[in-house]
Amino acid sequence: MTRYCVAVALSSVLVLVGCKPASEEAVEKPDAALDKREAAAPAPTETAIPEDLDLVILNGRVMDPESKLDAQRNVGVKDGKIVAVTEQAIKGSETIDAKGHVVAPGFIDTHHHNVLTPFGQKLALRDGITTPLELEGGVMPVGEWYDSMGGKSQTNYGATAGVMGARETVLNPKFKSIAGASMNDLDQPKITGATMNWSTKVATDAEIEKVLALVEQGVKEGARGVGLTTGYMVDGITSRETYGVQAIAGKYGLLLGLHGRFSGQDQGASGMLGTDEQLAAVLAGGGGLIVQHMTAQCLALTPYCQEMIDKAYAKGHQVISEIYPYSYGATIVGADYLHPDNYKNNMGHDYGDIVEIATMKPLTKERYEKLVKTAPFTNVTFKNATEETVAEALKHPTSLIGSDAFPYAMKSDGSFVKDWDTPYDAVNGHPRGAGTHAVVLQMVREKNLMPLMLAISKMTYMPAKFMQDNGVPQMAHKGRLQVGADADITVFDPDTVKQVATPANGGLPSTGIPYVVVNGTVVVKDSKVLKGVYPGQAIRTSGADLPSQERDDSP
């Protein structure tokens, strides 16, 4: 039996005010305040159907999480929009026969570090993702990142203003970003001049002001909020900064994507305490908060972290959790939380639980220490939460699903993977970059993890609605399969969809997702990504969208 606690955030101190067992029924039936995340909308009414449709998807099982429609329908698309969801016979210039398949809204991934790379987009599309978003790490400079993708993206794309990139810019004068993609910059230090200053250096008051100014400028350039990776800057970043960037999110009515300060279970450095630090900033500074890959931080304390998040939401604060369906993660070897003082003593793992991605060999103490000293940006995987903890968190009715897709490395020489034509089997990396959404659907089928509609909602409507409620009006037209919505559509076979990627071959694409449509254009056809097709659009704020003064986020 799972135990849940009622938790209250007071400043940066966590106070447990009561614990009690919670039954499975309690998990499956959240209170009324939480139900609104999954509240059903009225079924859409049918309007006149244009005769000259661009695309029709026939005979499929249409599943729309907002209206709860789950029935065989034909879908008509014109000018990038869904214009018909009907039982009537319809015709169009292009036809997809979806008999035996689910026709769902295109998947939205709130945690994707490969948005900028053609290879990363290719893998995302094979996993049904139409809108990958870099919300945790963020990008910097924001305008440069968005401009670099205009007219060249197969998927929709969006990002937050990254504190990591802002800190490196201020604290390392020699740093030069490649198109603003901070995670990619760290993977190529010889080109960008990236150091670990962003992680380890404590900024002066003057430097903090410069960091905050860069983040705010990024919001004005169109970022969808703020990306904060406190867990990579445990001893470097100050609470003044973590509060300051949350206040920026609050000022403009946007969200913050969080990698919490602590990963572990010890009282003084627990994932729950790291979550509480940013919850306190939300209470004071406003704005929304996505606690990303929550199980990787909270571990065995995950039920308590989720309870705290749900209670905060019930009190009117815009906060939600995000989970990936794996008991191991991917990061750089120099990550603070992999230091043996934390990884062994606080997370309960050892050097052998860390695997160097380029070679797929477990680390030894000697290899770990050498890499941290000479190549701290080396990509690794590492064990974190248990499979049981992950499964419980995935099926919780209010959590989102996000992949945390991480950059891939060539098997041949460990180099950064970017090119679209790179063979799937030529790369090493965490399978989550290729199979997160497929494996969740597989778990629904094989393990009865949760209802299929809830799983789809966690990948589509729920992230869209949360972002819509936090300053991203474009998302009101995404995550839905109904008339008037953007024609981002994923067609999958519920009986065969599965993850193919493995730890040894992390770049193998998912199967059972034969068609993916982005803004009305077929990008995946017969399980093949079409080369040179770029219908992706920016998820980006214009200056006119931003409020002229600070929003009041008090409940």
Image (tube, rainbow, N blue to C red):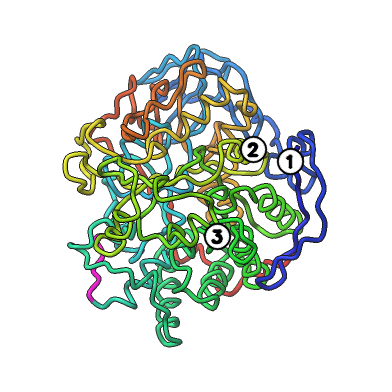
Which element is circle 2 on? Answer: helix
Q: In this picture, is 377 found above or below 482?
A: below
* 175 within the magenta span: yes
Task: Identify residue type, mark 1.
Answer: Thr
Residue 2: mark in rendering? 1
Task: Identify residue type, mark 3.
Answer: Leu
Q: Earlier in the sequence, mark 1 or mark 2?
A: 1
User: From mark 3 to mark 1, how far is it between C-alphas?
Assistant: 30 Å
Per the rendered image, the range of residues in magenta is 174-178
Query: Main structural element of the magenta stretch: helix, strand or loop?
Result: loop
Task: Identify residue type, mark 2.
Answer: Glu
> Which residue lies under the disc numbered 3?
255
Q: Position of residue 429 (x, y in %)?
A: 32, 41
Give the quadrant of the C terminus: bottom right
Near mark 2 (Cα within 10 A), the count class, few <14, some 14-19 or many ≥20, is: some
**Does residue 486 appear left or right of residue 450 in this picture?**
left
> Which residue lies under the disc numbered 2?
392
Q: Is residue 552 visible?
A: yes
Q: Residue at x 26, y 44 (%)?
A: 358
Which element is circle 3 on? Answer: strand
Q: Position of residue 312 (x, y in %)?
A: 72, 58
Q: Residue at x 63, y 58 (%)?
A: 272
**Does residue 172 appear left or right of residue 299 in this picture?**
left
Q: Between tags 2 and 3, which lies in front?
A: 2
Near mark 1 (Cα within 10 A), the count class, few <14, some 14-19 or many ≥20, is: few
Q: Earlier in the sequence, mark 2 or mark 3?
A: 3
